[in-house]
Image (cartoon, grey):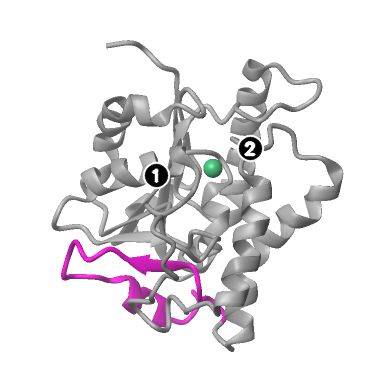
Amino acid sequence: MREFETLHAIVDEKKLELPDQALVVVAHHDDEKMWNMQSHLAQRGVGLTVLVLTDSSGRDLKGYTPERLAKARWTEGTASAQEAGLAGLHRIGLPDGQLSSYIDYAIEFGEQFIDDKAVVFAPNYGDEHPDHVAANIVAQKLAGDATPLYEMDTLTGYDQYGNVLVPTEKDIYQPLSTRTARKEKKIYKELNPTQTKNIPWHQRKAMFDALGMTSRRGRERGIPHAAVLFKANNAINDPTRKWLQRSVA
Ligand SMILES: [Zn+2]
């Protein structure tokens, strides 16, 4: 088996001792920010372990070789993990943009972290980025039939068949109006790295809009942590609702 670099950071050892543990599976550093839920759960006494499945070096940034970018993103990732109150951050450096060709490696990497986890969070299967779809497939495999899997918002509000996503938990996921979904799909298209290699300055606003989407939708409906997740129907037990009802520690 080909070797890929793995990086490990125990961010807060005490959090690994908490009775409630969750695994977040993403393709790239920052993907988990799209769902805006992690610090929320961390504050409520959930130990979060984030797995990043690629070296996240795919963006073409001036002054950065892929190696340098991969390194910088790890540094940035550990800093933001600290800020979000995570328990741990782990990365396997599979090639950014080609994750779907390395799913077995990703699963093998993830298997060492799944045992004590009560919930798995992953990008949406309907996401437009092929690496995000691959991360979802890995998470499905790790979660199996017993561990509930939550999918993050697609940002577009659409699945791959063009259906507006329907919430399965109305206080956790909220429906989008067709108009908003269309607008967000457009913003996301502009961000899709397979279509735009560089992100020009004028698109940075769109980027921040995309990052703020989930929280904005929630605020519009008076739900502070809405529009971030919906549950794949793979398991009956589900502690997430209970976690969210807890008051902040
Ligand atoms: Zn990503």
Q: Is mark 1 within 8 Å of ligand 1?
A: no
Horizontal side of residue 9 vs 211, given as left or right: left
Q: Circle 1 is placed at which residue position? A: 133
Q: Position of residue 191 (x, y in %)?
A: 66, 46
Disc 1 marks which amino acid?
A: Val
- Relative height, residue 189 to residue 154 (above, below): above
Query: Which of these two is toward me, 51 or 61?
Result: 61
Question: For numbered disc 1, what is the local secondary structure?
Answer: helix
Q: Which residues are magenta?
A: 224-249
Q: Position of residue 42 (x, y in %)?
A: 48, 63
- State the predominant SS element of the stretch in magenta: loop
Horizontal side of residue 205 vs 21, given as left or right: right
* Cα distance between the residues tagged 1 and 2: 17 Å
Q: Quadrant of ligand 1?
A: top right
Q: Is mark 2 within 8 Å of ligand 1?
A: no
Q: Circle 2 is placed at which residue position? A: 195
Which residue is at a point 34% across and 25% down the rendered structure image? 102
Disc 2 marks which amino acid?
A: Gln
Residue furthest bottom as drawn: 222
Q: Quadrant of residue 183?
A: bottom right
Residue furthest top as drawn: 2
